[in-house]
């Protein structure tokens, strides 16, 4: 599940995320908004209720990796693995 959330984020925001952030808080808000929306949509479509904190964990991971300068694909891979380890649903 977490992998699809991060993939949805990438598809929705790839153009924005590939550019360097001019204002970190604005970019973080954009990343988080896309990620949380995709996460909620996917869980709803799957008929699942995510564990408390799962969405925040996944989206914070992506945001942090991108802020650190990781490429989008690397951030997706790392966060997919980290979220699946912490929330094995």
Image (cartoon, rainbow, N blue to C red):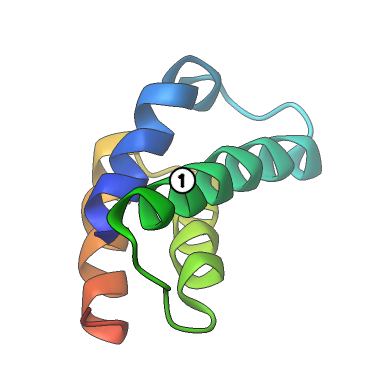
x, y (%) of residue 54?
45, 74
Residue 24 visible in the shown view = yes
Report the label total: 1
Left or right: residue 53 versus residue 51 is: right
Q: Is residue 68 visible?
A: no
Please, is residue 84 above or below residue 9 in the view? below
Q: Which residue is drawn at 54% across and 62% down?
A: 60
Label 1 element class: helix
Quadrant location, the N terminus: bottom left
Residue situated in front as seen by the camera: 51 or 30: 51
Front in this rendered view, residue 54 or 79: 54
Residue 74, compared with residue 86, is above or below; it is: above
Seen at 45% across and 24% down, the residue is 12
The C terminus appears in which quarter of the rendering? Answer: bottom left
Horizontal side of residue 82 vs 9, given as left or right: left
The answer to which of 23 and 48 lies nearer the viewer is 48
How many residues crowd around disc 1 within 10 Å: few (fewer than 14), some, or many (20 or more)? some
Residue 20 rendering spot, x and y as whole percentages: 58, 25
Q: Is residue 52 above or below residue 57?
A: below
Above or below 48: residue 39 = above
Q: Name the residue: 31% across, 72% down.
A: 83
Residue depicted at 50% across the width and 66% down the height: 55
Task: Depth check: give the residue in front, 40 or 2.
Answer: 40
Residue 25 at x, y percent in the picture: 79, 44
- The residue identified by callout 1 is 41
Asked if residue 42 lies left or right of residue 81, the reply is right
Residue projecting furthest to the top: 15
Residue 19 point in image, percent of width and height: 54, 19
């Amino acid at each position: 599940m977490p992998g699809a959330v991060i993939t949805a984020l990438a598809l929705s925001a790839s153009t924005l995320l590939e550019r360097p952030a001019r204002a970190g808080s604005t970019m973080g808000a954009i990343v988080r908004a896309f990620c949380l929306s995709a996460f909620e949509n996917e869980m709803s479509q799957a008929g699942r209720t995510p564990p408390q904190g799962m969405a925040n964990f996944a989206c914070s991971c992506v945001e942090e990796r991108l802020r650190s300068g990781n490429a989008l694909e690397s951030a997706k891979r790392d966060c997919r693995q980290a979220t699946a380890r912490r929330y094995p649903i």
